[in-house]
Image (tube, rainbow, N blue to C red):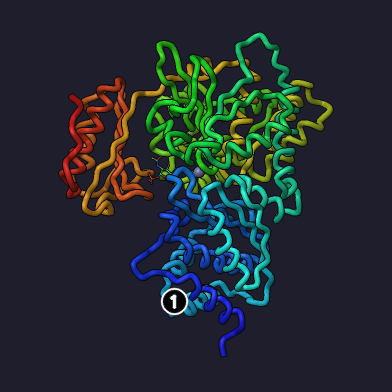
Amino acid sequence: MASSWLTSALSGASRHPKRPEHSYSYGTAGFRTKADILEPVLYRVGLLAVLRSKAVKGSTIGVMITASHNPEADNGVKVVEPMGDMLLAQWETYATSLANAREDDLESVLQDIISKENIDMEQSANVFVARDTRPSSVSLAEVLIEGIQSLSGQYVNYGLLSTPQLHYMVRCHNTQGSYGKSTETGYYEKLTNAFTKLRQKNGGNGKGSYSNQILLDGANGVGALKVEQLKEHLKGQLDIIVNNDGSKGKLNEECGADYVKIQQRPPPEMDVKPETKCVSFDGDADRIVYFYMGKGGKFKLLDGDKIATLIAGYIQELLTEAGIQLTLGLIQTAYANGSSTHYATKMLNVPIACTRTGVKHLHHKAQEFEVGVYFEANGHGTVLFSPSVIPKLDDVCQDKSLSAGKKEAATKLRLLVDLINETVGDAISDLLVVETILYQKQWNIEEWNSSYTDLPNRQLKVKVKDRAVIQTTDAERKTTSPAGLQSAIDELVAQYNKARSFVRPSGTEDVVRVYAEADTQIAADELAAKVGVKVHELAQGVGDPPSLPS
Ligand code: NG1
Ligand code: ZN
């Protein structure tokens, strides 16, 4: 006779049948597709989250319902590990098998996970649930909860949260509050307490051109709502004006960090005056970019690379002032602008590591340093501090033999640790970190932007029959297949100044991405197009090859 949990799980699944024509894959950003085909996936993710919680002896697991920067009609779901990290690779495979299992195979897929992971089905389980502002997220959360309950899991439904807020809640809960209180108020209090203290310490002589005014593009998403709550705790220290707050426009439509970065222009809804400091979040507030309209109405973007170098440089300065030796590293991907890499190595003296695209690769690499700053150029990033860091900072703060200056620098670093959401890139936390540093330096956005000048660059997409024929090595900076492609790219790159180019298959779209940078925009455009043509030629391109700029 089937166990009662199995009967309950299977009967629930029959209420949310999976259609044979749909297939799903748990990618680096979880499951993500059209919202109207996600119901069976959500139910099965409910089952998976309970199994994961049981497998980690009842520690709390998080499930976030969002499709981040995708259009409003899409949705998605991602699972958060007990310390707030992303789901383990082995469990991504289980998630994909569960989501795709035919109804009559579901039992064997569940049994397989239980036996491979040696799961005690008597163990209790707990899941934290949250969602973004997509209309479809409400009913999808209900289906997810049905899945959790069918395996007798306990759950807390937080309703609307940003993705990083959920990661934070999960970590706080599993570390018995040592990371902070697992409530939304606890989140704002932790960040704003650290922010306020740092602001007092940094003094800000008011002589520079720093302005506390920020025009925020909330992507018509959850970040806009959460910033309004943050403002109550900031008590006027920042003057944040929220645009695209969801009251009229659609989520991510002509707004949001992805739109601003790709279109290289402000959202049309925003009335951006010259030199005004602007910020754009994505739909679930785990990405942030800054921008402004410079002289002559020229759009200027300060992306993840600019934020990362600002933060790494600040940490480097404080470590030097405090006389503390820690290994500090900046982790980038091949998409990082060559100027940012040059600036970090030559001017800041911060070592660089390059990983494959996808935040989990950056996150893992960052763990190899005592202080690891990681950012994707598109604005997703944070800082990781190894467990050895806080005791080292505390020692300096308490050492009476040391100078006041050293102790002060160590205290600022200690506060910075509290200001950063280490679990995942967090637009709100990153905003507070950037504003702290700009205030200390008394910089306006133009002064920050002039720390280095981005090399002109271009990204293209090429459609090919099977993008898997493109194989890469060296953190995706070189191709090993198809034959002849890398030597063709090398020859093209050699014809331009300060040039670099690479191609890789996208992990989220059925395209090959081409990146090129060079000393002028014309050269970058031409190089990208020529490399695109080579990809089209050597990797069985579909449709027309990219056209060369006229
Ligand atoms: P793909 O489609 O693999 O290039 C994109 C972004 C990544 C990352 C993922 C996940 C670029 C060039 N790529 O990946 O940085 O954010 O989506 O959402 O921006
Ligand atoms: Zn996002």
Where, by quadrant of the figure, is residue 466 drawn?
bottom left
Pick the residue in front: 80 or 369: 80
The image position of residue 205, as x and y in percent, is 70, 12
The image position of residue 167, as x and y in percent, is 62, 49
Q: Is residue 147 left or right of residue 480?
A: right
Residue placed farthest to the front in the image? 248
Q: Is residue 543 left or right of residue 101?
A: left
Ligand 1 within 8 Å of disc 1? The answer is no
Pick the residue in front: 495 or 168: 168
Res. 316 visible in picture: no
User: What residue did someone put label 1 on?
Assistant: 103
| Vertical order, 512 against 550 (above or below) | below
Residue placed farthest to the top in the image? 207
**What residue sits 59% from the left and 23% below the top?**
214
The quadrant in which the C terminus is found is top left
The image position of residue 271, as x and y in percent, is 49, 21
**What residue sits 36% from the left and 64% below the top?**
22
Q: Is residue 391 left or right of residue 112?
A: right
| Vertical order, 160 against 62 (above or below) | above
| Vertical order, 434 against 353 (above or below) | above
Give the residue type that dot 1 points to: Glu
The image position of residue 395, as x and y in percent, is 77, 35
